Image (cartoon, rainbow, N blue to C red):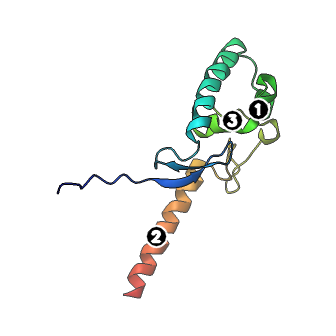
Amino acid sequence: MQRGDYPVRKFDLCACVVCGKAFACRPENRTLCPDCRQEVDALYEDVKDFLRANPRMAPTAEQLADLLGVEEKKIQALMADGRIAEVEDPRRRDRRCQSCGERITGGNLCPQCMAKVHQNTLRASRKDLYSRR
């Protein structure tokens, strides 16, 4: 390394999911700008305390935002970060796998059928690769 050479830090330009403001982000933090990150961090403590005080309540993101008087986007940001579990939406309670019919909590396929789809895709791509040679 010569004098004046500094290690290059890679930053991307991202849009905050809460306020929409553009900010320079690192690959591991692409969702929230620094200002909203502080607000969401403070909100996390309130949400955690609320859910602990009301263990039998299973509010949706919309209901939780109304109860706490905050924007739903902030609650969704906590869910996207994995800091709070996504609460089951009553409209999606009885979802079934489109392939085998097993009950699922999200998406369109159960994990077993999803694995089969991935295996078939890999086989097809390998077959195409060898047939082109």
Dot 1 lies on which element?
A: loop
Mark closer to the chain start, 2 or 1: 1
Q: Amino acid at mark 2?
A: Arg
Q: Is residue 125 left or right of residue 104?
A: left
Expressed as whole percent of the image width and height from the top left, the position of residue 3 reads 18, 54
Expressed as whole percent of the image width and height from the top left, the position of residue 64 reads 76, 27
**Mark 3 to mark 2 CA distance (whole Å):** 42 Å
Q: Nearer the viewer, mark 3 or mark 2?
A: 3
Expressed as whole percent of the image width and height from the top left, the position of residue 109 reads 65, 52
Mark closer to the chain start, 3 or 1: 1
Q: Nearer the viewer, mark 2 or mark 1?
A: 1
Q: Nearer the viewer, residue 23 or 130?
A: 23
Dot 2 lies on which element?
A: helix
On residue 26, which mark appears? none
Residue 126 visible in the displayed image: yes
Q: Write down the residue under mark 2.
A: 123
The N terminus - image quarter: bottom left
**Mark 3 to mark 1 CA distance (whole Å):** 13 Å
Q: Amino acid at mark 3?
A: Lys
Residue 1 visible in the displayed image: no
The residue carrying pointer 3 sits among few (fewer than 14), some (14 to 19) or many (20 or more) residues within 10 Å by Cα, namely many
The residue carrying pointer 1 sits among few (fewer than 14), some (14 to 19) or many (20 or more) residues within 10 Å by Cα, namely some
**What residue lies at 61% left-to-right and 40% top-to-bottom?**
80
Q: Nearer the viewer, residue 43 or 117?
A: 43
Q: Write down the residue under mark 3.
A: 74
Dot 3 lies on which element?
A: helix
**What residue lies at 53% left-to-right and 55% top-to-bottom?**
13
The residue carrying pointer 2 sits among few (fewer than 14), some (14 to 19) or many (20 or more) residues within 10 Å by Cα, namely few
**Mark 2 to mark 1 CA distance (whole Å):** 40 Å
**What residue lies at 57% left-to-right and 48% top-to-bottom?**
111
**What residue lies at 75% left-to-right and 45% top-to-bottom?**
95
